[in-house]
Image (cartoon, helix red, strand yellow):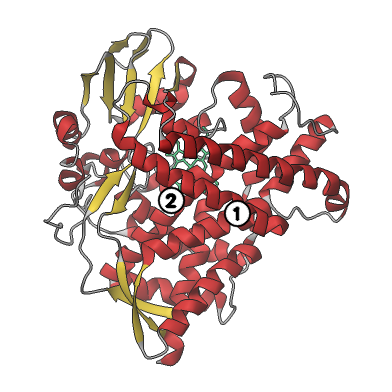
Amino acid sequence: LKASSQPMPLSHNILPRVLSFYHHWKKIYEEWLNAGATFLVWFGPTARITVSDPDLIREIFTLKSEFYEKNESHPLVRQLEGDGLLSLKGEKWAHHRKIITPTFHMENLKLLLPVMGKSVVEMLDKWSAMSASGEVEIEVSDWFQTLTEDVITRTAFGSSYEDGKAIFRLQAKQMVIAAEAFQKVLIPGYRFLPTKTNVSSWKLDKQIKKSLIKLIDRRKENLCSEMSDGCPKDLLELMTRARAKETNQIRSDSPSSPSSAITVNDIVEECKSFFFAGKQTTSNLLTWTTVLLAMHPQWQDLAREEVLSVCGARDIPTRDDVAKLKGLSMILNESLRLYPPAIATIRRAKADVELGEYKVPRGTELLIPILAVHHDPGLWGHDATEFNPARFSEGVAHAAKHPMAFIPFGLGARRCIGQNLAILQAKLTMAIILQRFSFQLAPSYKHAPTVLMLLYPQYGAPITFRCLSSQ
Ligand code: HEM
């Protein structure tokens, strides 16, 4: 995408702007604006139906989900996301999901709060030092990416933090290479050619796998002693525990058959998936929330009052504190509604199926435009494009005219497994920021939501921070 010379005014009606980037899909995306529309377009040889009616969305994700499967990711994306939950299908996916799900239960994740908090405090100590003279302008999206990378590393690898960090650095490099290669993906068979970029990416892939296997093998040796002191320290341990519980023995050899226990290879692929799925999504949520609170100081003040009354002077909120931050939850939900990091998702019909009054032939793709559903005035009212966290005051199910109108993490069996982790991290980070700083948009801020896989601010998000303790 080329940078646009015309940033948007500070409005949350982002659809025309975001969609106008898809020149070659313009017609498709113009239809998105026609909220509630269900329509078909030919996408190359594939028929693709865009479905934005929440009743039909419910059918696809829940009531008739057995008729649909995820579509194939682009091969380059697949290489990055790994053969983990994001891309697996059928029995193998169900088996992995069952094993990994407890890893992401809120009760488990809350045990990781102190380590997450440590990363946030380290980042904010740097901001404090930078703002010693009063205020400082910070490009938050870069910092939040580093933060989420750090948190995912600590959350995934805990005591093996340094090794984990080295592994995720390799993956970050691989992502940069893939982003460059993306421009050439239209060349048939490009990904198989031994070009300089492909060779570097293959080498990185080998290195990542080798390092992860070494790390898991080390954990295997320590598993008994780690299990003896009760409290799991990181996701890797939680996964190896789940695996050990199932098999009582870790195999690092063959790939798993659907009915067998999760293998070391599988854990490697899942670690890759978590990094890919969790880093930029969560940092985007943090970026947009900070931008929104900078644009709406009355909500920033309310959120700060809540944080100060719940957490007092505690450096890092406790798990009870986090549960009590209801206003902050409403703000995060409103941020996810207006600026959902994942703007759409796609399913494919596995068989001929009836969808509402339509007959959908096998092989048809169905695109669910999360962004458009979240901005539909028919579902959200006349203020659909305004920032109004109060709409979530009675809970998510009552925020809109339809319970399926809020889907930032997808729906049904394949909904985001990292949702709790993302929300916990975002709540913790925003709470500590609000405790320590007041902030507003920097003069150089230009509002320009843009899509490149995820929804992000095209010109970054420069924000001016003032340290509250120095006032
Ligand atoms: C799936 C969004 C954070 C891991 C999904 C899906 C969405 C989503 C929309 C469903 C995709 C579909 O149905 O096709 C988000 C957003 C996040 C976030 C908005 C942050 C604000 C995370 C984090 C992790 C994660 C932190 C892990 C550490 C995954 C995985 C899946 C997934 C593994 C695939 C689940 C499955 O198919 O079983 N995410 N995600 N996500 N997400 Fe997230």
- Image quadrant in which the C terminus is located: bottom left
Q: Residues within 10 Å of mark 2 (few under 14, many from 20)?
A: many
Q: Secondary structure at mark 2?
A: helix
Residue 278, position as x, y percentages in the image = 50, 47
Q: Read off the residue under disc 2.
A: 280
Residue 144 location in percent, x, y? 44, 62
| Left or right of 339 on screen, residue 207 | right
Farthest residue to the left: give it.
6
Is residue 175 or residue 281 the one in the foreground? 175
- Give x and y (percent) for residue 165: 60, 56
Name the foreground residue: 98 vs 207.
Answer: 207
Q: Amino acid at mark 2?
A: Gln
Q: Nearer the viewer, residue 358 or 268?
A: 268
Residue that appears at 45% across and 73% down: 433
The quarter of the displayed image where residue 194 is located: top left
81 vs 459, left or right, is right
Residue that carries the numbered disc 1 in the rendered image: 166
